[in-house]
Image: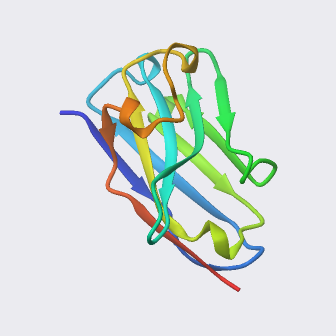
Amino acid sequence: EVQLQASGGGLVQAGGSLRLSCLASGFTFDDWSFGWFRQAPGKEREVVSCLSPSDGRTYTADSVKGRFTMSSDDAKNTVILQMNSLKPEDTAVYYCGAVSDTSLDNFDYDRDDEYDYWGQGTLVTVSS
């Protein structure tokens, strides 16, 4: 059974940091690509960052570039989103998604309808 378990959200002051993790199980980690998306109240879900572990391709949205970094720990079947210099506008529920493809080059990674599986979401709240 394919599962994605996201964790690491919480309440943090502006300028602080959080580290989100997404543990993947039920499939061969390197055969898949991953993305972090977020959805703020009243807004559509938007892409934050994407990664294909097999070739190391990454994508980071302009809104978080220079502050957020996505990586993978292949040994632990986990993708990580390190979030630094957080801003109140980063407040959202963050979701990790997985696509059955080995490279970001092969699909539209910034579209949430491209993703096959989703984790349950983890809430990040940044206070001003």
Q: For residue 32, what is the image quadrant? A: top left
- Horizontal side, residue 84 vs residue 29: left or right: right
Report the residue at 50% width, 63% height from top: 8
Report the residue at 57% width, 35% height from top: 50
Looking at the image, what colour scheme do you see? rainbow
Report the residue at 48% width, 15% height from top: 102
User: In front here: 38 or 33?
Assistant: 38
User: In front here: 52 or 92?
Assistant: 92
Q: Please determine whether, in this image, residue 122 is positioned above or below residue 72.
A: below
Q: Where is residue 79 in the image (x, y as percent from the top left)?
A: 52, 40
Number of numbered tags placed on the structure image: 0
Q: Please determine whether, in this image, residue 41 is positioned above or below residue 2.
A: below
Q: Please determine whether, in this image, residue 29 is positioned above or below residue 41.
A: above
Quarter of the picture containing the N terminus is top left
Q: Position of residue 63 (x, y in %)?
A: 72, 53
Report the residue at 73% width, 73% height from top: 16
- Residue lying furthest right in this view? 66
- Residue lying furthest left in this view? 1
- Horizontal side, residue 96 vs residue 109: left or right: left
Q: Position of residue 39 (x, y in %)?
A: 47, 60
Quarter of the picture containing the C terminus is bottom right
Q: For residue 27, what is the image quadrant? A: top left
Q: Position of residue 111 (x, y in %)?
A: 47, 35
User: In front here: 59 or 11?
Assistant: 59
User: In front here: 76 or 15?
Assistant: 15
- Horizontal side, residue 121 vs residue 38: left or right: left
